[in-house]
Image: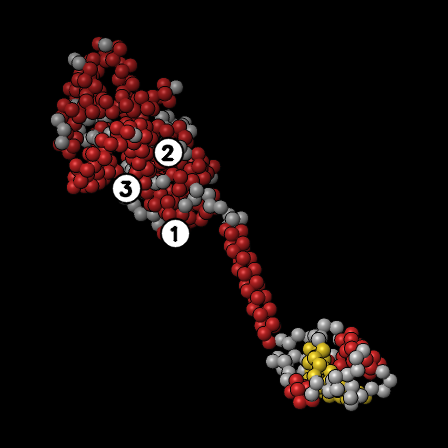
Amino acid sequence: MSAAFATSLFIHFELPFAHHIAKLRFFLTTFFGGAFRRLRLRLLAVFSACFPPVNLPDLCALKTGEASAWDEAFSWLWPTVFAVAKLKLQPYFPNEIEDVAIESIEQLVEKVCGLKSAEELKPLAASIAHHRAVSLLRERFAKKRGEGRTDSLEAQSDEGASQSEPTSSDSPLANLEQTELADRLGKSLADLKPPMGEILSDFFLNGLRYEEIARSRGVAVGSVGVYLKRGLEAMRQIWGREENS
Amino acid sequence: MNDQRFFDLAMKVIARQANDAERADVDALLADKPELRAEFMRLEADARVAKDALPIVNAMRETKGELPAYARGRLRTMVRQTLGRPESAVEPDRSLAWGWRWVLGLAAATAVVVIVALSIFHAPNAPVIQLAMLDTVGGTRGTGTNELVTLQEAWKGSPVQTFSNASELQAWEQKWPNDYGRTAAKIIYDPAAGEIRVSGHSHGKPFQKTFPLEKDLATTLQQVSTFVREQTQR
């Protein structure tokens, strides 16, 4: 976006005075070649710094505790932490989802100084929310077992969604540390570019058939399998080490 | 059967979307080629990873949902406590410094105003002493000079005005400094009359007395000095 804006600025200002600007550029390049190039690069760098990529919070401002930067970050992070907490807690403790989401952002605030880039924010927030939700489930179910209650998980479930142990230890995510999980989530987010991520989700999460996926995503039926294969290979690359161990 | 065909069949079986014929095909392949069994198991594991990880990856793409207002307040507090500089450590320092600067500035301005006001409205404590001598006959050389020196010695710093006629002296006697509120005294030595006249005012009240030369000038001047001091220090 910033590059496009810079280009449009350049064109806008260059066209009316193209002749003079060309002469000036020739003069500057001839007599101050290296310095002129460095100046242009610095100007570009300054421009890029002034117009950072959209939708990413300013990590420096967050680290210094700037209230307005955090206000934006809260709104930006909230859908993620809420959705992650909801994944685990909706069937059992839907009333706890908001609390877990808020606590996750609170924990992120404590950890923000250790981050190197703004791209790490969401994966870390998601990882924290996941771990907090799993911890809550383990704690609550351990407590119920300790009290001798024998209710089945299905009976407690509001929507009856989960048929499996909510904190199953055979999950590849179960034993990952917070930062490691965040790292892998970040890589997954970056590597599963459209429509690969969507097709994997359609197939594994939504249970759609090849034909339905092809229709909804506008790809050939023969391509769905190819996307799935590539997507799984990408995930194996990212999550494989834990799987092998 | 190529790899992609086996993959597609395996996927359908793993996702429980395969029909009987497709399931039979996969079973036959696994039985026929044992190396495919390992591949099938790996795909099953991959599918488990996908089922566990994809929901969280998708959650990171979620953009809907609004942070509750109460949560925003709680989170702001958390940010202030964790990352914000303590209010009592930094901000008050600056505000305190500015506060003191204001206080100091105000104090300095007040002091200037008070000093100026005092200099304008308040008369100094030291009385103005004006000395004069009436010498109508021109005096006897030597005697007059001695008397003048004696008079001068009594109130050092106040010059002695010498008048040769009474009208000039009278005019001088009527003329007081502009600052009427200030304590002042006029001491007039009249050798011809053998007296020292004192007139003046202190704190707005006039005083006047005539001292005849009884013994000598110096003794009388001491009496005059005592009188003036008494009158001006009331």
State the separation of the CA atoms marked 2 and 1: 28 Å
**A64 w.r.t. B216: above or below:** above
Checking the image for residue B70, the label placed there is 1
Q: Say which element carries label 3.
A: loop
Up-down: is A146 above or below B98? above
Q: Residue furthest right?
A: B215
Q: Chain of mark 3?
A: B
Mark 1 closeness class: few <14, some 14–19, many ≥20 residues within 10 Å? few
Residue lying at 63% horizontally and 84% vertically, measured from the top left: B175
Q: Residue B87: horizontal and vertical position, in percent?
A: 50, 50
The residue singled out by tag 2 in the image is A117
The kind of residue on which mark 3 rests is: Thr
> Separation of disc 2 and disc 3 at Cα?
20 Å
In this figure, which residue is indicated by the disc labeled 3? B63
Residue B97 falls in image quadrant = bottom right
Task: Indicate the position of residue B110 as horizontal and vertical percent values.
Answer: 56, 66
